[in-house]
């Protein structure tokens, strides 16, 4: 069988823990990680950074007819989320019984992103869920 | 130096199905909910499994006490629903909590008590000074064949415990295990659902092992049920833990805070560990907690805990069991079947 394990493996730090990069010269953060800073070019001082994962929904869509791999998830919400550190990323919104709203605050959750059928590897990674209050709030 | 729990975290999926909705489909003429003393059970989302639950619980445990994941020297994940037959859950958890790569990991399997077996393994490494911190996890997305009695209680959830020697939230004063070859419940390799011995799972399995481990520990430590403020027993349903507690001399008040099965069902490897977490959520420094797990096959691990001052420092650092229980979203049987993958497309 064909496996995408090597490609998936290379992205594990990004997908599991939202590891990106931050340029200390211009203070801009990047996700996915960049090898060069588009602002500072040769003057860039890039360092690895772990994003908190909290952010705000900028826009979203709801998928009712998905490709075969995502059939079981429909209907599901796909959103562009602005992380608190700045970068905008595309992610799925789960655990939102009242639906998704623009401006909604979200946090990261660890979920299955996909599977290579019954026999292949399971892709894990980050999705997003609405921030809710807890007993101590 | 004393060893014990430095921090803990839980995760319970938000979806629930009421038992009367399951019995609406598989009506066998009795009030199942009343006879099992379970009213609803947790159901995983379509993209959740025992790995995602283990990761969420482990992240909550580290967040609660603001612990550096690089200190972790061992990750032992207990479950009877590991998604891979070969590929350890602990490796994925380690990467997802940003542990260093300098840790040992293994997956544990002992039906519903794999999580407490993982705690014992961590305790050995920590107490001997071989590692700084170890994470023991019990998580499951347990399976019950459609219409089988197991389907009424087989739920999803998990708990993670960080075991160490410093800044303890609860000292583990001692443990005692009792293990025999008792075929009360099993799942053969490659089979999707477990089988069980019906009533045989009661007296010769659950009650014999839980009672023997509990009495063994009380005798070893020279304590009595009255010396404890709280007690937690494995919760396959709402009747067994109440009955075994009474049989051993523990009161209803002692077990009440940790009795979560009526609201979330049997979370298997997470069961008594979530019950312990619910008890720690309200315990005060100086309180003593008696915990006994049970795993079919069969065995029990009993623990004696003394809550330390550290509990107040970490109490609000992560969601409580009640936080998760309070976030319930109900499914009908059709949606439940979709969530559990019972529908083959």
Image (cartoon, grey):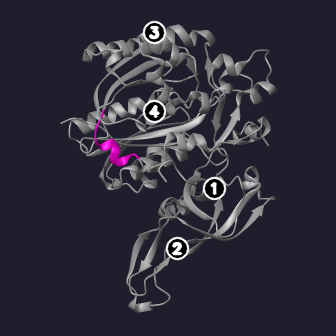
Q: Secondary structure at mark 4?
A: helix
The verdict on a common chain for dots 4 and 2 is no
Q: Please state which of the two labelled residues, at mark 1 or mark 3, is closer to the viewer.
A: 3
**In the rendered view, would you say A46 is above or below B110?**
below
Residue B142 lies left or right of residue A52; in this view the side is: right
How far across and how far down the image is residue A79, in percent?
A: 67, 67
Marks 4 and 2, how far apart in space?
37 Å
Q: Please state which of the two labelled residues, at mark 2 or mark 3, is closer to the viewer.
A: 3
The verdict on a common chain for dots 1 and 3 is no
Report the residue at 68% width, 69% height from top: A102
Is residue B85 shown to the viewer in this render? no
Q: Is residue B312 magenta?
A: yes
User: Which residue is more in the foreground, B259 or B27?
Assistant: B259
Marks 1 and 2, how far apart in space?
28 Å
Question: Quick one: label 1, few (<14), some, or many (20+) residues within 10 Å?
Answer: few
Q: How many marks?
A: 4
Q: Secondary structure at mark 3?
A: helix
Q: Which residue is mark 3?
A: B247
The chain ID associated with circle 1 is A
The chain ID associated with circle 3 is B
Report the residue at 67% width, 48% height from top: A117
Residue B331 lies left or right of residue A133; in this view the side is: right
N-terminal label among 4 and 3: 3
Q: Please state which of the two labelled residues, at mark 1 or mark 2, is closer to the viewer.
A: 2
Q: Which residue is mark 2?
A: A31
Q: Secondary structure at mark 1?
A: loop
Marks 2 and 3, how far apart in space?
58 Å
Report the residue at 48% width, 34% height from top: B274
Q: Which residue is mark 1?
A: A2
């Amino acid at each position: 069988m064909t496996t995408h394990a090597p490609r998936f493996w290379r992205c594990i730090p990004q997908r599991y823990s939202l590891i990106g990069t931050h340029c200390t010269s211009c203070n801009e953060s990047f996700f996915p990680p960049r090898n060069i800073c588009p602002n500072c070019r040769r003057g860039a001082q890039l360092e690895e950074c772990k994003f908190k994962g909290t952010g705000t929904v900028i826009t979203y869509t709801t998928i009712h007819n998905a490709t075969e791999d995502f059939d079981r998830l429909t209907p599901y919400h796909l959103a562009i989320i602005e992380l608190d550190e700045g970068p905008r990323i595309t992610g799925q919104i789960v655990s939102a019984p009242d639906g998704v709203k623009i401006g909604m605050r979200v946090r990261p959750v660890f979920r299955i992103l996909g599977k290579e059928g019954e026999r292949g590897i399971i892709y894990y990674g980050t999705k997003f869920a609405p921030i809710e209050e807890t007993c101590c709030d | 130096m004393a060893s014990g729990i430095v921090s803990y975290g839980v995760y319970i999926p938000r979806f629930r199905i009421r038992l009367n909705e399951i019995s609406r489909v598989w009506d066998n003429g009795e009030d199942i909910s009343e006879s099992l003393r379970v009213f609803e059970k947790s159901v995983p989302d379509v993209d959740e499994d025992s790995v995602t639950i283990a990761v969420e619980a482990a992240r909550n445990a580290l967040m609660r006490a603001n612990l550096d994941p690089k200190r972790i020297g061992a990750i032992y994940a207990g479950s009877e629903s590991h998604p891979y037959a070969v590929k350890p859950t602990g490796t994925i958890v380690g990467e997802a909590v940003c542990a260093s790569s300098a840790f040992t990991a293994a997956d544990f399997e002992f039906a519903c008590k794999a999580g407490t077996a993982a705690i014992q393994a961590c305790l050995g490494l920590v107490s001997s000074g071989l590692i700084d911190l170890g994470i023991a996890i019990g998580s499951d997305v347990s399976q019950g064949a459609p219409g089988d009695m197991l389907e009424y209680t087989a739920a999803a959830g998990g708990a993670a415990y960080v075991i160490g020697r410093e800044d303890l939230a609860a000292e583990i004063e001692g443990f005692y295990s009792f293990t025999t070859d008792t075929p009360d419940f099993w799942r053969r390799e490659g089979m999707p659902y477990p089988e069980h011995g019906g009533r045989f799972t009661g007296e010769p399995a659950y009650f014999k092992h839980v009672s023997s481990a509990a009495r063994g520990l009380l005798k070893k430590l020279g304590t009595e049920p009255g010396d404890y403020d709280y007690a937690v027993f494995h919760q396959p349903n709402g009747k067994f833990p109440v009955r075994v507690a009474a049989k051993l001399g523990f009161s209803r008040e002692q077990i009440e805070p940790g009795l979560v099965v009526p609201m979330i069902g049997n979370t298997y490897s997470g069961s008594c560990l979530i019950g312990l977490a619910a008890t720690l959520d309200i315990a005060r420094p100086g309180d003593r907690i008696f915990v006994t797990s049970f795993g079919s096959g069969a065995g029990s691990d009993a623990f004696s805990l003394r809550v330390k001052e550290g509990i107040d420092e970490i109490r609000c650092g992560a969601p409580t069991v009640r936080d998760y229980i309070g976030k319930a979203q109900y499914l009908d049987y059709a949606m439940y079947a979709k969530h559990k993958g019972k529908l083959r497309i």
